Image: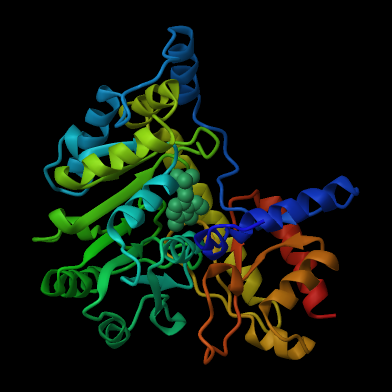
Amino acid sequence: MKLARRIERLGTENAFVVLAEVTKLKEQGRDIVNFGVGEPDFDTPSNIKKAGIKAIEENFTHYSPPAGVPDFRRSIAKYISKTRKIEVDMDNVIVGPGTKPIIFYAISALVESGDEVVYPNPGYPIYESLINYVGGKAVPLALIEEREFSFDINDLKRAVSDRTKMIILNSPQNPTGGILSGDDLQAIAGLAIKKDIWVLSDEIYSRIIYEGQFESIISINGMKDRTILIDGFSKIYSMTGWRLGYGIMRKDLIKHMINLNTNIVTCTATFTQYAGIEGYEGSQEDTYRMVDEFKARRDLIVSGLNDIKGFKCLTPKGAFYVFPNVTEACRNLGLKDSKELQQLILHEGNVAVLPRTSFGSRNTEEREEYIRLSYATSRENIIEGLKRIKKVVEK
Ligand SMILES: Cc1ncc(COP(=O)(O)O)c(C=O)c1O
């Protein structure tokens, strides 16, 4: 079989590979504590579910316009205008089946073969995968533990060149839980404006934040017309399986994204979009409760991890991930890297975590080892999982 070369360049999201392995082990009767997967364990709030059911019963089961249901786009525009303190209207909004397609659309519409794209590393693996897929050059921007997983401005300056077409940001961040400060964003905006670079700002965890203030680069003067903001319903409303996300961008760019929707998916499920209207317009109580619970779990998991020999874990300010440094544990156990530790923890400890290698290519000089744990699971699971990891690592 002779495949197109681009398909060989496409990476994957290892969380789903580990999930398949966990499912197989579970089928064999193994009891696995799963810190691998990045989705809230809460149910979709009942008012949103009811709105979705009502929409089906009222026969909103046909195609919607490719850009999205107008009332939903208006509701998103209102939400973004308020939360990001900018003026946008429905024509700046494209709805997609999740935020992932919008990431793909933005990269494929703007990045030519050979163009450079600066992306966070460690980071959400889909960025690197899609940059490579379209033939762009993926330029990693290291996120540094000592800086609470922000970047060094000198690294950013070195990463940007005359060929840089786009900088990708993600704050709060997967996999580290770090957030970018106002100063970080100002530095990026300054460079983007000076060098005429697009910014793709993935803000899917913007409301899962425990300390500090969420800030968006799109709010900075001069950034609105060069920012593609993406956000969605998967995380904050526990709607991963509904598939609902959107992008905000200038109107002369959005028409190409809408055309991509037309070519690829036609539209997002119409009743799902009606559920989304209820998400933004209805009660937010469930989201507050969920974020409070995540904060308690974060504190529990951070203190438990710091109690394991050879683990060192910062307290992240956002998202629902921790990214402990496990360099010393690997050394103590005679393991080559975090991948070997992940396998040991899975097969001997019956606990699923993800290794550093799941979050972008490693620089050859990188010496530190990390794993990611998602604490979107119950406190009982967290306590049990930590007990098992401790047993394996300190044996
Ligand atoms: C940083 C980041 N962006 C995007 C997504 C994809 O979300 P969606 O379900 O909206 O496609 C995820 C999901 O894990 C994520 O962590």
Q: Is residue 42 visible?
A: yes
Q: Is residue 180 above or below residue 98?
A: below
Q: Nearer the viewer, residue 85 or 4?
A: 4
Judged from this view, the residue extending furthest toward the front is 2
Residue 242 coordinates in the image, percent (x, y): 51, 32
The quadrant the C terminus occupies is bottom right
Front-most of residues 219 and 107: 107
The image quadrant of residue 390 is bottom right
* Scheme of image coloration: rainbow
Is 166 left or right of 45, judged from the image as shown? left
Q: Residue placed farthest to the left in the image?
A: 221
Residue 136 in which image quadrant = bottom left
| Residue 47, above or below 345 | above
Most extreme residue toward the right is: 29
Q: Is residue 316 left or right of residue 258?
A: right
Above or below: residue 263 compared with residue 124: above
User: Which residue is at a point 25% across and 24% down the rendered structure image?
Assistant: 70
Task: Give the position of the N terminus as an image quadrant.
Answer: bottom right
Camera-nearest residue between 165 and 19 = 165
Number of marks present in the image shown: 0
The picture places residue 293, in percent across and down from the top left corner, at: 53, 48
Write the residue at 59% across / 73% down: 356
Residue 96 appearing in the image: no
Q: Position of residue 7 (x, y in %)?
A: 54, 58
The correct choice, above or below, for 305 with respect to 235 in the image is below
Residue at image x 49%, y 70%? 315
In the figure, is residue 305 to the left or right of 210?
Answer: right
Residue 266, given in percent of the width and then of the height, sits at: 39, 30
Q: Residue at 21%, 56% (x, y): give it.
A: 227
